[in-house]
Amino acid sequence: MAIFVEMEENKPIKPINRRTLLTQTVQAVSEMGKLPPQAVDIEEAVLGAMLLEKNAVNDAIDILQPESFYKIEHQKIFAVILDLFASSENIDILSVTEKLRKKGELQLVGGPGYIARLTNKIASAAHVEYHARIISEKFILRSLIEVSSHVIKNSYDETQDVFNVLSEAESGLFRIAEGNLKKSYQNVKDLVSQAVTEIEKASENKDGVSGVPSGFTDLDRITSGWQRSDMIVLAARPGMGKTAFVLSMARNTAVQFNQGVAIFRWRCQAFS
């Protein structure tokens, strides 16, 4: 198949091969600059699936957030879907359209016609979770580019403190990772069984210590031992014995109570 392009006046029309035209288009885009990672067609398919089937919302809601979508219009549509889901309302073309109309954003997303066309982008919601992960991956890549660009800019700025630049880079990467961790869940039956087992085990402890003992009797009596998921911050002025106290607890836990212990030493330098 050929595509005909109008040439100069009084000159014959010259056919251009589709492959040639595609190559020229890609070259033109490359010369203008790089496009951010995106998957707009998949975004349309995922939104269409959520408008068609309720299960699709359940599959995608833990993976995506409004800013995961590249197009602003898709961000607004997904935000409305989240609002309807949180309110336990039906999610379909009519409810989403009406919600956008009430928010005054219906025309900003392309009107009712665009929302209706989203359902034509997909025939089944069977692979919506897989598609949602692709959207999430593109968002992570865009976020990494943003953080990296900011780090590169500050790295070339000689007025910036190098440790502040490093701290901002670490914070940016941690924020990206934290915001894209999939929420996990456990079966209620397993949780109840685990709770019963722990209660029975705690009832067998005559000393009242249900957690990991520190070896300091008064402290264990107050805390019942260090509990699972606890993060204990030990703060004091320099030279007051924090390290010695921690090492003593670690020694007691490992030697007296045969519990596994790991120590990670991290030195944090403060700046005024």
Image (spheres, rainbow, N blue to C red):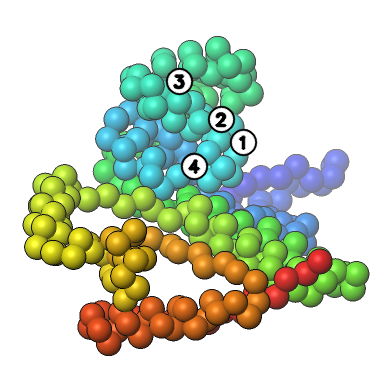
Left or right side of 194 for 88: right
Q: Are marks 4 and 3 in contact (CB under 8 Å)?
A: no
Question: In the rendered structure, which disc, 4 or 1, sits on the residue that comes first in sequence?
Answer: 4
Neighbours of disc 1 within 10 Å: few (<14), some (14-19), many (20+): few
149 shown above or below 44 = below
Amino acid identity at mark 2: Lys
Neighbours of disc 4 within 10 Å: few (<14), some (14-19), many (20+): some
Distance from label 3 to label 1 (Cα)? 16 Å
Amino acid identity at mark 3: Val
124 shown above or below 248 = above
Q: Nearer the viewer, residue 195 or 123?
A: 195
126 shown above or below 38 = above
Which labelled disc corresponds to residue 96? 3
User: For residue 159, which quarter of the picture?
Assistant: bottom right
Which labelled disc corresponds to residue 72? 1
Can you identify the residue that label 4 sits on? 65
Question: In the rendered structure, which disc, 2 or 3, sits on the residue that comes first in sequence?
Answer: 2
Q: Nearer the viewer, mark 4 or mark 3?
A: 4
Amino acid identity at mark 4: Gln
Tag 1 secondary structure: helix
Q: Nearer the viewer, mark 2 or mark 4?
A: 4
Question: In the rendered structure, which disc, 4 or 3, sits on the residue that comes first in sequence?
Answer: 4
Q: Give the residue at the far right of this rendering.
A: 159
Q: Are marks 2 and 1 in contact (CB under 8 Å)?
A: yes
Q: For residue 131, say whether it is visible.
A: no
